[in-house]
């Protein structure tokens, strides 16, 4: 099972700080040569024209007088929170880990043999989706015969034809 948490850094901060919900939010990082750039941005900031890779000064100019939150991107905090989420996902299968990407946005869980405990794969994925929603996260969950296939389904949205309103897809 793959649990893809799009825009994880923004999701993590919004879950920790609910006052940021609905507000334009930008995470910045230092690029080569010391230039400050946009690393991640919320949907609200995207609607203001802010894009990843954009110089931070330009993003601040686009924000104008609107209350936009600017913070430094903390990849260690994001990774630590995602690791904790992976540990919490071990209730669905004995092995859970982060995807091997920088920065990671997925938790992969080996659910081999675990589906009957939850009355099927769909029910297992729905339970995972419910847990994530309760924590304030938006996720796309996919189950397939291999982790790679589940990752591809979750990341591409290809399971959407077989997904219900919970964001759960099984391939």
Image (cartoon, rainbow, N blue to C red):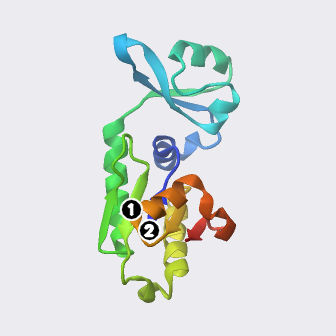
C-alpha separation, residue under disc 1 versus residue under disc 2: 6 Å
Q: Position of residue 62 (x, y in %)?
A: 66, 18
Does residue 34 appear left or right of residue 163 in this picture? left
Q: Quadrant of residue 122?
A: bottom right
Q: Earlier in the sequence, mark 1 or mark 2?
A: 2
Residue shown at the point (58%, 68%) measured from the top left = 168
Looking at the image, is 162 positioned above or below residue 45?
Answer: below
Does residue 118 appear left or right of residue 170 in this picture? left
Q: Can residue 164 be seen in this snapshot?
A: no
The residue identified by callout 1 is 108
Looking at the image, is 74 positioned above or below residue 50?
Answer: below
Q: Position of residue 133 (x, y in %)?
A: 55, 62
Residue shown at the point (44%, 49%) measured from the top left = 105
**Between 51 and 159, the one nearer to me in the picture:** 159
Looking at the image, is 133 positioned above or below residue 17?
Answer: below
> Dot 2 lies on which element?
loop
Disc 1 and disc 2 in contact, CB within 8 angstroms: yes
**Between 37 and 157, the one nearer to me in the picture:** 157
Label of residue 1 in the image = 2
């Amino acid at each position: 099972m793959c649990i893809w948490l799009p825009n994880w850094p923004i999701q993590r901060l919004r879950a920790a700080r609910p006052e940021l919900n609905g507000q334009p939010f930008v995470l910045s990082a230092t690029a080569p040569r010391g230039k400050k750039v946009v690393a991640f941005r919320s949907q609200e900031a995207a609607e203001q024209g802010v894009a990843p890779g954009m110089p931070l000064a330009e993003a601040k100019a686009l924000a104008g007088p609107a209350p936009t939150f600017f913070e430094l991107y903390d990849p260690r905090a994001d990774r630590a929170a995602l690791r904790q989420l992976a540990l919490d996902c071990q209730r669905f299968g004995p092995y859970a880990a982060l995807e091997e990407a920088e920065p990671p946005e997925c938790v992969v869980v080996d659910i081999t043999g675990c589906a009957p405990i939850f009355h099927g794969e769909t029910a297992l994925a729905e339970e995972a989706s419910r847990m994530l929603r309760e924590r304030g996260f938006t996720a796309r969950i996919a189950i397939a015969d291999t982790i790679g296939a589940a990752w591809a389904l979750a990341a591409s949205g290809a399971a959407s034809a077989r997904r219900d309103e919970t964001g759960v897809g099984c391939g």
